[in-house]
């Protein structure tokens, strides 16, 4: 099987732009004796606290806490690289907790809309959550088969940016959720079609 080339995603570009900063920060944290898995777990705790504020209706403050968790999301990988060893469990933990983070955030939004008696927007939040899971799941399953899948506009970094804008700018909340609900599910279908075309089928 000839593997297709990977597109350069926005996440790849941002990571490359800040690689010098994250590398220095990762070395400093590593010298302080902090394990990357600890950073990953702390990041999820910050997301959980932010999600609690979102569920209570404090959308902007919750969004600010989610914004504060982003450096931790980048730092755990930088610390792992500073350790100069492959940590396969750390990669699994990071990916798993990312899914928990998605569930907490969109679950909090669904709870908020339920409390506001807005069933349509509740379903919108659940559709965005479903699409987010499908985007990640298709990539993970394809990776097990030896196929790297990065196509589509709504990888995790793009989803986070869209979600932060929706939370921090109140008029963008519902339009942002529409963009996420539609965009993530389209990306999921794109990835499934890409996998169908490029994986050998018996």
Image: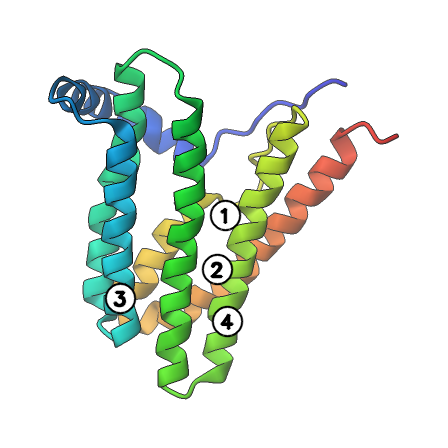
Residue 124: mark: 4
Is residue 116 positioned above or below 138 on the image?
A: below
Mark 1 vs mark 4: which is more N-terminal? 4
The image's colouring method is rainbow
Mark 1–mark 2 CB contact (< 8 Å): yes
**Crowd tier of the residue under label 4, counting other residues whose Cα lies within 10 Å: few below 14, some 14–19, many 20 or above:** many
| Residue corresponding to mark 3 | 52
- Percent of width and height locating residue 146: 65, 23
Q: Which mark is residue 154?
A: 1
**Pointer 2 residue:** 180
Residue 35, quarter of picture: top left
Question: How far is mark 1 from mark 4, CA to CA?
Answer: 16 Å
Alpha carbon distance from label 1 to label 2: 8 Å
Residue at image coords 28%, 68%: 54
Q: CA distance from mark 3 to mark 4?
A: 19 Å
Residue at mark 1 to residue at mark 3: CA–CA distance: 25 Å
Which of disc 3 and disc 2 is earlier in sequence?
Answer: 3
* Residue 96 occupies quadrant: top left
């Amino acid at each position: 099987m000839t593997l297709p080339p990977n597109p350069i995603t926005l996440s790849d570009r941002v990571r490359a732009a800040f690689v010098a900063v994250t590398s220095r920060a990762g070395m400093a944290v590593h010298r302080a004796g902090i394990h990357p898995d600890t950073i990953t777990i702390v990041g999820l705790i910050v997301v959980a606290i932010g999600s609690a504020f979102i569920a209570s209706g404090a959308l902007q403050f919750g969004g600010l806490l989610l914004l504060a968790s982003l450096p931790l999301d980048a730092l755990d990988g930088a610390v792992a690289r500073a350790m100069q060893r492959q940590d396969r469990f750390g990669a699994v933990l990071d990916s798993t907790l990312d899914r928990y983070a998605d569930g907490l955030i969109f679950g909090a939004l669904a709870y908020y809309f339920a409390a506001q008696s807005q069933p349509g927007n509740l379903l919108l939040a659940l559709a965005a959550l479903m699409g987010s899971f499908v985007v990640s799941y298709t990539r993970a399953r394809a990776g097990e088969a030896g196929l790297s899948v990065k196509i589509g506009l709504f990888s995790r970094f793009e989803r986070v940016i869209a979600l932060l804008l929706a939370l921090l700018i109140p008029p963008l909340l519902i339009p942002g959720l529409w963009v996420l609900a539609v965009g993530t599910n389209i990306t999921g279908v794109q990835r499934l079609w890409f996998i169908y075309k490029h994986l050998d089928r018996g």
